[in-house]
Amino acid sequence: MKLEIRGVGKRYRGNVWGIQDFSMEVGPGVLGLLGPNGSGKSTLMRILATVTRATTGSVKWDGFDIASSPNEVRKVLGYLPQDFGIYPNLNALEFLTYLAAARGISGRSAGRRIDALLQLVNLFDARKRPLGSLSGGMRQRVGIAQALLNDPRLLIVDEPTAGLDPEERVRFRNLLTELAGERIVILSSHIVSDVEAVATSIVVIKSGHLQFHAAPEELLRIAEGKTWELTIPSSELPDAKNRFVLSGTIRTSDGIRIRVVADRPPTEEARALTPTLEDAYLYLLAGNRPRDG
């Protein structure tokens, strides 16, 4: 089971490139995609999900080119786009039954699968409520269920925890961990902690280009000796935001404790800290490249 991406680019009107010269190989596990808004994450995921075609390069699923043989990946694909739409007058049970039929899942097995998925996403008791009456988080859980209908080998989820409360987010992260052993799971999120909790490898995308692809531990290593903490008066916070890359602030009785990502201590009083994944991510986005080795 392998996904091969070679030199992929997507050009839009006005000669604007969503991604350019993007190459990587993905095997079983959870691949976390990190990057600022507009960096190209959703463009890449739409190409992999065969929703849009690449302008340049190729993508292969187990040796099949997905542009010329899209059904080879579609029959094993589960996809939750960021802009997941619903039919507001249908309830969750009707909606999932309709999608199962459209995907060729037979009636009896579809019923069992749908019941299990509604239990899994904690919506069984609300299965007959119209989708239009559900909260944003509940509709997102319906989206998660539809992505799992065909027990996919390739699962692509774009901002899947948007609108979920903390308990639901933990449940979904645990679900991704359970699924990952036998599948390729690609998770795009702006919430670094979600990626950190489940990813076996991480990709950082910036301005449509691949900046980093390795294990989370490798990303953490690039920020070793680059994370600092100091306390400043509240009045100095705006200036600190302009001068430094801040990965966190905590208000205390002595002032504001700031967490700074930088090559050198920002002041003589700064104390070195062990970096988190978010520290490393921000350090990389600030224009720093991974060190060799």
Image (cartoon, rainbow, N blue to C red):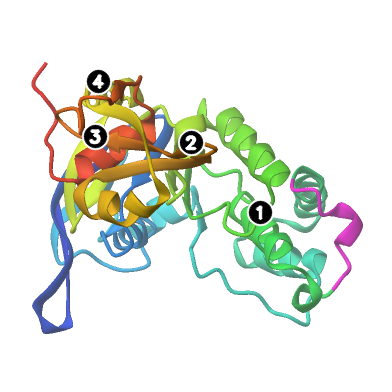
Q: Which mark is residue 224?
A: 4
Is 292 or 73 nearer to us in this picture?
292
Estimate the x, y position of residue 21 in percent, counting from the top left. Answer: 10, 53
Task: Please provide the residue range marked out in magenta.
Answer: 121-129
Provide residue 240's location: percent of width, then percent of height: 27, 49
**Cα distance between the residues tagged 4 and 3:** 18 Å
Q: How far is disc 1 from disc 3 in space, using C-alphas?
A: 28 Å
Mark closest to the chain's N terminus, 4 or 2:
4
Which residue, given by chain and number where applicable, does mark 3 sit on? 213
CA–CA distance between discs 1 and 2? Answer: 35 Å
What type is the residue that disc 3 sits on?
His
In the drawing, what numbered circle is on residue 164? 1
146 sits left or right of 89 in the view: left
The answer to whether marks 4 and 2 mark residues whose Cβ atoms lie closer than 8 Å is: no
Picture residue at 34% right of the left edge, 29% below the top: 229
Of circles 1 and 3, the one toward us is 1
> Disc 2 marks which amino acid?
Asp
**Amino acid under label 4?**
Glu
**Nearer to me, 265 or 17:** 265
Label 3 packing within 10 angstroms: few (<14), some (14-19), many (20+): some
Q: Main secondary structure of the magenta part?
A: loop
The amino acid pointed to by label 1 is Leu
Dot 1 or dot 2: first in sequence order is 1
Q: Which residue is mark 2?
A: 254
Task: Check the image and report above or below for 144 versus 89.
Answer: above
Q: Nearer the viewer, mark 4 or mark 3?
A: 4
